[in-house]
Image: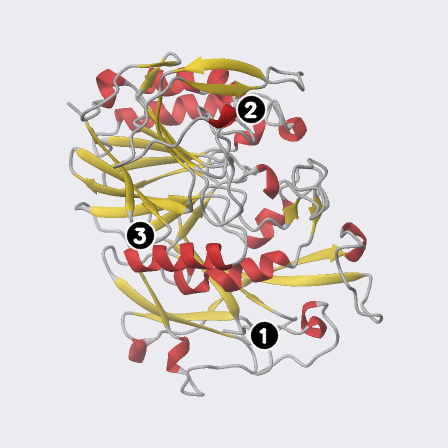
């Protein structure tokens, strides 16, 4: 993996393809069937020919090369803030990033595969670079498993620590809950500004930083408002489509909206930008298509005898008392009734950079304060897990923290924005059960009939636990 990328390489200056251009930033994703489908994605710092993946069930039995698709992404220096970046005097006006993707299908379930990346002039197998061989594992038919989730990772030492914690837990997969690289970011001198600046090269750092975990553990992403990059196409999704390959099976052309099943859990990734009143750039952009698909797909999951639990993940907090962004009223109005209708068990979000868990909620009201949750009777549990690494937020109106060993139950205040309003509406709520202002992640342990949801702090300490058990 290349860890010291020169500006010359990043800006796409002329350089011969070959051994000098090492693959970096490996990241995996499942297809709609995680038992048989995995996509291997990576970057190279310049143009190469014949990129490929070789894989097999042992390092000594790697098969023939599988060709990768190259998705170049051109960005302009003029998109970046001139006062924040010290550009080289001979830097070109544009630069190109090269993202590569190889879809592996027909895999054997419940199997560990070894893989290695190469291209014309660079063959790590022939060069005996066995240290570049990584592994992944396909899903089995059933059995216990653990997955992790966190959002708002960004870059830096807190983000690196979070990635290391995920790797240490060795989950079956990780849910990355939007606002991923912070390539779209607030000006340094205006940390609360909504007039974002952009640096596409932060994605290089993001992928390099996470290679330690994403090279072996699939990262299933959902889109946050910082993934809306209006520079590449009219949808704002062009950059995402170049960098990632998710199942995206809601309809032809959907991006970040998809469904899949792992053992006894059905998962839905949603684009919450469509129901965001505060940042309306994508508001109603699918003209109701996503809403209809959610209703239909949740119905399909509930009709599937293999699905016990349904987990929805998106970026914007549906219910939260976070100070920075609050709760998303659009999601409460449009999506929560469908979650109630189909008995969604767990909703995982981020956006607010903190950890918060609600009591189970039905029709906007908390139903149960303590004990094991029976989602069928009690409602949906909503979690905000935005402590992935970026600078932390506070709770609205200075609501005190309340977590394992430090319980402080209070009536908190939720702020939300009505459609078309720039002024928040305050609502007193009693469902804010756990509030923790720290870095960390969520780990969900799954066995037949039960989800055990744990929140872990940056040192691995447990700050929350709730059990969801279908009666």
**In the rendered image, which quarter is residue 373 located in?**
top left
Q: Nearer the viewer, residue 5 or 38?
A: 5
Horizontal relation, residue 180 to residue 447: left or right? right
Residue 325, percent across and down?
A: 56, 29
Dot 1: element: loop
Q: Name the quarter where the C terminus is drawn.
A: top left
Q: Which mark is residue 4?
A: 1
Q: How many marks?
A: 3
Numbered circle sitting on residue 85 = none
Alpha carbon separation for disc pair 2 and 3: 34 Å
In the rendered structure, are the residues bearing label 2 and label 1 in contact, judged by CB atoms less than 8 Å apart? no
Q: Tell which of 252 and 163 is nearer to you.
A: 163
Direction from residue 55 to residue 306 in the image, left or right = left
Occupied quadrant, residue 155: bottom right
In this view of the protein, can residue 327 be seen by the observer? no
Q: Which residue is mark 2?
A: 275
Give the camera-side residue of 358 and 7. Answer: 358
């Amino acid at each position: 993996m290349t860890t010291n990328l020169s500006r010359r390489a990043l800006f796409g200056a002329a350089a011969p393809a070959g051994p000098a251009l090492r693959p970096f930033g490996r990241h995996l994703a499942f297809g709609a069937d995680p038992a048989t489908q995995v996509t291997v994605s990576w970057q190279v710092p310049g143009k190469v020919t014949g990129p490929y993946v070789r894989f097999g069930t042992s390092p000594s039995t790697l098969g023939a090369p599988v060709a990768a698709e190259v998705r170049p992404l051109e960005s302009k220096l003029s998109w970046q803030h001139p006062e924040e970046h010290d550009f080289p005097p001979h830097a070109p006006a544009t630069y190109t990033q090269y993202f590569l993707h190889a879809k592996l299908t027909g895999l054997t379930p419940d199997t560990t595969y070894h893989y290695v990346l190469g291209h014309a002039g660079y063959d790590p197998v022939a060069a005996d670079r066995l240290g570049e061989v990584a592994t992944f594992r396909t899903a089995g038919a059933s059995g216990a498993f653990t997955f992790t989730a966190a959002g708002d990772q960004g870059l830096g030492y807190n983000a690196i620590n979070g990635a290391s914690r995920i790797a240490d837990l060795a989950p079956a997969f990780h849910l990355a809950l939007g606002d991923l690289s912070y390539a779209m970011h607030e000006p340094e001198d205006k940390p609360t500004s909504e007039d974002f600046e952009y640096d596409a090269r932060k994605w290089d750092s993001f992928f390099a930083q996470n290679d330690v975990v994403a090279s072996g553990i699939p990262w299933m992403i959902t889109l946050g408002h910082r993934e809306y990059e209006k520079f590449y196409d009219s949808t704002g999704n062009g950059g995402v489509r170049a960098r990632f390959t998710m199942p995206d099976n809601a309809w032809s052309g959907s991006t970040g909206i998809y469904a899949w099943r792992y053992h006894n859990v059905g998962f839905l990734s949603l684009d919450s930008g469509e129901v965001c009143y505060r940042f309306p750039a994508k508001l109603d952009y699918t003209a109701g298509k996503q809403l209809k698909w959610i209703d239909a797909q949740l119905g399909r999951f509930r009709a599937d005898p293999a699905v016990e639990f349904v987990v929805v993940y998106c970026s914007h907090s549906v219910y939260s008392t976070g100070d920075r962004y609050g709760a998303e009223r659009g999601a409460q109005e449009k999506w929560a009734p469908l979650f109630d209708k189909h008995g969604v068990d767990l909703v995982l979000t981020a956006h607010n950079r903190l950890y918060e868990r609600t009591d189970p909620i039905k029709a906007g009201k908390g139903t149960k304060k303590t004990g094991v949750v029976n989602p069928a009777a009690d409602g949906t549990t909503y979690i905000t897990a935005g402590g992935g690494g970026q600078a932390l937020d506070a709770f609205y109106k200075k609501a005190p923290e309340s977590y394992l060993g430090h319980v402080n139950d209070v009536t908190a205040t939720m702020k939300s924005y009505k459609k078309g309003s720039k002024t928040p509406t305050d609502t007193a709520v009693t469902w804010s059960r756990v509030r923790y202002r720290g870095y960390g992640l969520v780990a969900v342990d799954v066995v037949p009939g039960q989800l055990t949801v744990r929140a872990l702090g940056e040192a691995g300490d447990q700050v929350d636990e709730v059990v969801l058990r279908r009666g």
